[in-house]
Image: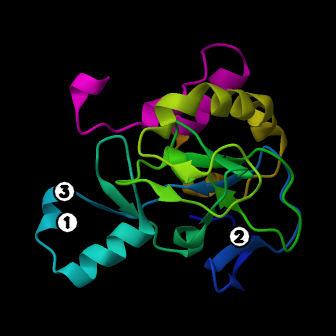
Amino acid sequence: MIHPHTELKFISKEVGYGVVATQLIPAGTITWTLDKLDREFSQDDFDQMDPIYQDILEFYTFRNNHGRLVLCWDNGRYVNHSFNSNCLSTAYDFEIAIRDIHPGEQLTDDYGYLNISSPFRGIDEGTRRKVVYPDDLKKYHKTWDNKIKKVFPKITKLDQPLRHAMNDPTWAQINRVIQGEEEMQSILANYFSKHPEAE
């Protein structure tokens, strides 16, 4: 479920539609969470579909750490890629704003942590990285973890409209991390490899 203070908007011919903030979303806000309406598809499910449906799933889904394709039921599926994304996925089935997102600004993800099936060249944003690779999680998880850790303690201090869509065990785990009772799980926990020997 995407944060309620967002809307779908046409961005450009190059990227199509995107999700933009309708009011300030402070750093530390949960911007998306997996919920009961999101659908998961196994590789067998995918293989048995006609190409027209496979193309839709390839475009609109991400792959979780079990190798299942996750299709967001709402506008969450329109969040665009950025090498300098303002949201990051966590190991707890939610995404978090790593800096303030202002009204009219796009919510963006780095597709490098979404277990894409093949590399693609992103829009040039002046960053060192120019291409998104399937194994980017293995290369950049420490950098992403550090960004998440900086804002993670803010979660319980902010208004969280998506709290109602999250389960209580996850919320309890968030609290334990913030209180120093356990370590924050690395975003690397989201990594899926078709080839276990590559681990």
Q: Does residue 37 show up?
A: no
Q: Residue at x 67, y 57 (%)?
A: 82
Instruction: Tell me where residue 43 sits by quadrant.
Output: bottom left
Horizontal relation, residue 137 to residue 102: left or right: left
User: Percent x, y for residue 91?
Assistant: 52, 36
> Is label 1 in contact with label 3 (beta carbons under 8 Å)?
yes
Colour scheme of the rendered structure:
rainbow
Q: Quadrant of the C terminus?
A: top left
Residue occupied by mark 3: 43
Q: Does residue 122 show up?
A: yes
Residue occupied by mark 2: 4
Q: Residue at x 64, y 22 (%)?
A: 176
Q: Residue at x 13, y 59 (%)?
A: 44
Amino acid type shown at disc 2: Pro
Disc 1 to disc 3, how far (Cα)?
Answer: 5 Å
Amino acid type shown at disc 3: Gln
Which residue is most to the top?
A: 181
Does the stretch in magenta take in 190?
Answer: yes
* SS at mark 2 in the image: loop
Query: Which of the pair 179/42 is nearer the observer?
Result: 42
The mark tally for this picture is 3
Disc 3 to disc 2, how far (Cα)?
Answer: 31 Å
- Which segment is the magenta one? 170-199
User: Percent x, y for residue 187?
Assistant: 54, 33
Mark 2 crowdedness (10 Å alpha carbons): few <14, some 14-19, many ≥20: few
Query: Which of the pair 14/45 is nearer the observer?
Result: 14
Instruction: Tell me where residue 184 sits by quadrant.
Output: top right
- Which label lies toward us, 1 or 2? 1
Mark 3 crowdedness (10 Å alpha carbons): few <14, some 14-19, many ≥20: few
Residue occupied by mark 1: 46
> Does label 3 or label 2 sit earlier along the sequence?
2
